Amino acid sequence: MTSKKGFTTKSLHAEFPKEDAYNALHMPVYDGVAYEFGSAEEIRDAFEGKHFAHAYSRTSNPTVEFFEKKLCGLTGAHGVVALASGMAAISNALLALVEKDGNIVASNQLFGHSYALLKETLPSWGIDVRFVDMGNMDEVGSRMDSNTRVLFFETITNPQLEVVDVSELCKLAHSKGVVVVADSTITPPYVFNSAQLGVDVEVMSSTKFMSGGAAAVGGVIIDNGLYDWGHLPALSCWADKFGKNAFLTRVRKEIFRHLGGCMTAHAAHFFNLGLDILALRVDRCVENCLALGEFFENHPKVSSVNYPGLPSNKYYTLSSSQFSGKPGAVMTIDLDTKDKCFEFLNHLEIVRRATNLNDNKTLIIHPESTIYCEFGDDEKKSMKIRDTMLRISVGIEDAGDLIDDFNQALSKI
Ligand SMILES: *Cc1c(COP(=O)(O)O)cnc(C)c1O
């Protein structure tokens, strides 16, 4: 299929890697574990990598392969590996890129478990991590040295909703030979073209937007094919043998295979369906965010509204160009006090009190008392987590119903 077609057309009509025996219109769920070979020679050749064939579902599976190829076609990437979760994608990607004694320069505003992985787990394995403010180019540049292998950030930070300048960060990293790994979970491929801005490796939690509405846990690693892997100590011998495929080959044949964080066929089925309706859902969520933003901005009990798609937002211009004017569907509001936040939450009827992002349902949470409850006051302050802030993951309900629900709850506080 030509790349000129739109996102949804391409997704719906992605070709199967192999013709289906029953002409199924949707990729079937291959829920089995092992695959039989016609001869001893064939199974030997497959194990030696002379030709590709599915052998065992921890290392590859037809339903998962279809999802990887479909996403690869949609993004125009060099290659995609699907994994058990967003955290599996992030940890596997970083472990394949950074050797012991190498270091990572990372944003000081990260999804909580990513932050913990970088702050505690990776250093315990001999990988040094320096946290920086990604909005401060001088600081980012000064923390990189000759052992820096990766610059790691999220396209929009959560829950602060700061938008990083992806193109500027990529230029800075590349001037020092550093690989850029971006977590674009909040801004999926339909709105964000990571390759165009220079991102080498994109990681995503497919649990969020891509699952079609909180249907399954999963993650992906995308190699945009921009970095010459021969320059990276962890991959130089892989590059001698596999060239452009060095990174994803090391992921598949070492890190991913040995750590065992595979995506199940059943989860891949949800992502295959989720991709088909991703654009429709994102468009609807963004419309709802804009309607809610306008409502909150005009409500006297709401002291501030934060959504990068609102013209009043300080990242509006950057997010308009970087995310095609569709900067995800997470917004925050501030009320006067923490008590008022709790009261407000308890009066909501349609909007659900839950964590997670990009469900079809609208979800709300008070981050300070939940996601960040294990952090001390100073850490919360440095991460800009205010106790007056509420995070809203906007779903696909009818906008009028959401506004009515928020309005009635606000009227009671
Ligand atoms: C949820 C999330 C993750 C982790 O994904 P899981 O699928 O839950 O492992 C990583 N990064 C961001 C930005 C997320 O929102």
Image: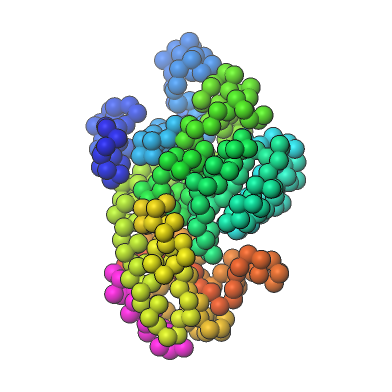
- Residue lying farthest top? 41
* Residue shown at the point (75%, 45%) measured from the top left: 124
* Residue shown at the point (60%, 25%) measured from the top left: 230
In-image side of 156 versus 398 (left or right)? right
In-image side of 65 versus 48 (left or right)? left
- Residue 311 coordinates in the image, percent (x, y): 38, 67
- Residue lying farthest bottom? 412
Q: Nearer the viewer, residue 244 or 170?
A: 170
Q: Nearer the viewer, residue 359 or 168?
A: 168
Q: Determine the image quadrant of residue 229.
A: top right
The question of residue 387 being in magenta is answered with: no
- Residue 108 coordinates in the image, percent (x, y): 63, 57
In-image side of 109 versus 315 (left or right)? right
> How many marks do you count on the picture?
0
In-image side of 97 versus 316 (left or right)? right
Q: Which quarter of the rendering shows the N terminus?
A: top left
Q: Is residue 146 above or below residue 342?
A: above
- Residue 259 visible in the picture: no
- Residue 112 coordinates in the image, percent (x, y): 60, 58
* Residue shown at the point (59%, 65%) measured from the top left: 371
* Residue shown at the point (63%, 30%) measured from the top left: 232
- Residue 206 visible in the picture: yes
The question of residue 403 being in magenta is answered with: yes
- Residue 351 coordinates in the image, percent (x, y): 40, 73
Q: What secondary structure prevails in the magenta region?
A: helix
Q: Magenta span covers which residues?
A: 398-413
Q: Is residue 248 above or below residue 375?
A: above
